Image (cartoon, helix red, strand yellow):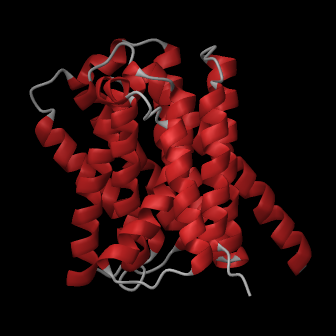
Amino acid sequence: MNLKNEDRLYSWLLVLAMLFWGGGWTALKILTINMPMDIIIFWRFFLMSLAFIPILYFFKKPIILNRGALKYIFGSSALNIAFMVSSFIAVKHGLAGAGSVIITSLSPLLTFLIVALLLSKAIQKHQYIGLFLGLVGGFVILELNDVDLFLQGSNIYFALSALFWAFVTIFSQRSHAYIHPIHYSFFISIVATIAAFIYAYDSDLLSVFNQDYVFWLALVYLAIFGQTIATTIFFMASGKLGSQRTSSFMFLVPIFALLTAWLVLDESIQLHIVIGGLISIIAVYFINTKFD
């Protein structure tokens, strides 16, 4: 396969991965209807761990664990669990499509802001414009004109999820110096599975086998397609197309999430979510683009 055809293949695979990620929010909404949070979180990470085994066999890369890798693995495991908890609560009481827009658009902005503040990274003029637009977009998306609605509704948990995912992103970027991304994701799922099992040990974990096929389709989709397969495609494409080009496909996630939630859950597409999401996407563009 020539280079041009290979790039085209990975581009289409990335579109598929973004579809899987976007649909994951609808799957999570379905799972929140009948089952407790601790049971869902355990089975999500457990199935994710199993799905990584054939992928590890495919890559056949030697696993190297050192103190630096373990530090980021355990840290990201805790953050991933915190992300799942806040996302579960938010989606249970809010809209799946709206949650995807909030998290996908706010996380890159929060990531940049955290790195700039904690690591004293210099901020360029155009990035200040991006941060301002990000604040405007976040204000619109989260409906901060009504503080009581924000504090009492699901948006506060979506905002927390975006913050947790920002730290997950930072940990992931820094872990590349110590461990391969696929191994990193696998060990995160293993540690998170063990932690979730300890927490949910007294719960009826086997009650999932009493659920119908819709529940299992959503669970398998979320754990395997929406996480393991999509993440693997993303990492593979990053190595072939470059991180900047690959990251640009992330803007498709909220679009797919809104459409999936509309088709499957009959959720309405709220105008303030669309407007705020577009403003935030423009903000991310200003932050990540180098202007001469």
Residue 208 visible in the current orientation: yes
Residue drawn at (65%, 68%) of the image: 286
Residue 118: image quadrant is: bottom left
Quadrant the N terminus occupies: bottom right
Residue furthest to the left in view is 202
In the depicted view, which residue is nearer to us: 264 or 190?
A: 264
Residue drawn at (58%, 64%) of the image: 130
Q: Is residue 258 left or right of residue 79?
A: right
Rendered location of residue 138, percent (x, y): 50, 45
Residue 261: image quadrant is: top right
Look at the picture and state if 118 lies above or below 200.
below
Q: Is residue 193 left or right of residue 178?
A: left
Rendered location of residue 69, percent (x, y): 28, 78
Q: Is residue 199 left or right of residue 219?
A: left
In the depicted view, which residue is nearer to us: 66 or 168?
A: 168
Residue furthest to the front in view is 145
Look at the picture and state if 128 lies above or below 229.
below
Residue 221 visible in the current orientation: no
Residue drawn at (64%, 77%) of the image: 239
Quadrant the C terminus occupies: bottom right
In the depicted view, which residue is nearer to us: 194 or 269?
A: 269
Rendered location of residue 7, percent (x, y): 82, 71
Look at the picture and state if 251 lies above or below 85.
below
Residue drawn at (40%, 38%) of the image: 158
| Count of picture labels | 0
Rendered location of residue 52, percent (x, y): 45, 56
